[in-house]
Amino acid sequence: MLKTLVLRNYRGFKSYRLDDLAKVNLIVGKNNSGKTSILEAVELLVTEAHLSVFYESARRRGEFSSYDRRGPRPEISHLFFGHDCQPGACFELSSDNERQSLTVRVLSLDEAGEVAWQSRSYDPDEQAEPAFAISIVSGTRKKDTVIPVAEDGSIMNGRPVFMRYRSIDNAVNFVGLESLATATMGKAWNRLLADGQESEVVKDMELLLPDIDSIHFLTGDKVSSRGILVGRRGTSRRVPIGSYGDGVRRLLAFRLALVGTANGFLLIDEIDAGLHWTVMEDVWRLLIEIAERTNVQVFATTHSYDCIRGLGTLVRTSPELGEHVSIHKLDRLLKQSVTLRGEHIPVAVEQEIEVR
């Protein structure tokens, strides 16, 4: 579990740190304060900058500068403070007094020539030639990963480069505003079936569907919500999950994202999206209890004071859960986040202190 997070020259942060991280962390702040960037920084750090993470981050943000015959090319320049992606530029992420660290540096072609380019990852048939390269150095990785970059700051060879490195050692799941793809949730559901634990998820879904009886994934169906059917008590007809609104699918995405993430990390962007404020207390309870039971560290973001209020109400009524929770308010005028640990959250809510 991460106890601190330090960012240097990463996206909108010249130098920033979060201290006193808990099992479940809620990241709050104004628009463009860097909340999603914190989630992505955690994802990069704990996966040691796995190449598929670079691609997925660019996909979520639409940070593709160009396309070639092999697909979109993610533009890595946006990961550097001030979008500075020239030889010598560097960003660093670290945790727990740099016992876990990651450095991504831009190299000139002469510098890159000193390190073997992994798998010669650019396509020699491309018209564009590499202009420079990036070096990825992890605190535990034995050698650098060096990737060629085009003049426009895009990683060359697009998707094939990233998909070549699919295996991620550390368990981590990122749930964005689009939730999880049906195929991704289906894989998690298959693991539940193998372990005989599907009834636990159905029970948890009663938060939003009190009369739910069953959940079914259609074999081979990867098209939107139509691949997931919900059965309800008192009727034999099963209805696509999309018929019940975004909140139901999103809650299922949270719950299934925790499957196979034991001893890992769950990252949730806009945790309250699609969920009514009246259920947030129960959603927080579910998330905290499962995270504690499975040793998953959670990082979530929100704009909603109702989301914070739900967390405060939970900690007030169940103070034993408060030790596992913290709120971190981002403000780029400061050098570090303002932290509220569990027992202080209900006090801040009751006194109507603005913590967003």
Image (spheres, helix red, strand yellow):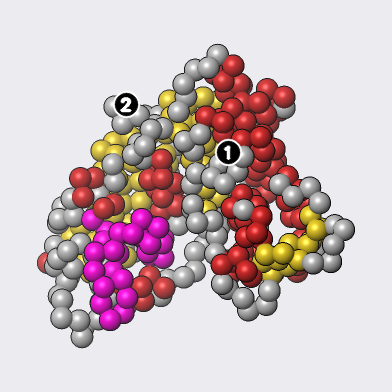
Left or right? Give the position of 217 relative to 119: right
Residue 251, relative to residue 320: is it above or below? below
**Seen from this angle, which residue lies furthest top?**
351
Residue 315, which numbered label?
Answer: none
In which quadrant of the rendered view does residue 10 lie?
A: top left
Look at the picture and state if 338 lies above or below 33.
above
Q: Earlier in the sequence, mark 1 or mark 2?
A: 1
The x, y position of residue 36, in whole percent, is 41, 45
Q: Which residue is mark 2?
A: 334
User: Regarding mark 2 in the picture, which secondary structure is present there?
Assistant: loop
Label ID, residue 24 = 1
| Span colored in magenta | 50-77
Q: Quadrant of residue 137?
A: bottom left
| Residue 341 appears in the figure | yes
118 left or right, relative to 109: right
Give the SS element for disc 1: strand
Residue 309, by quadrant, is top right
Q: Residue at x 85, y 57 (%)?
A: 233
Three-letter code, disc 1: Val
Q: Horizontal and vertical percent for residue 253?
A: 61, 55
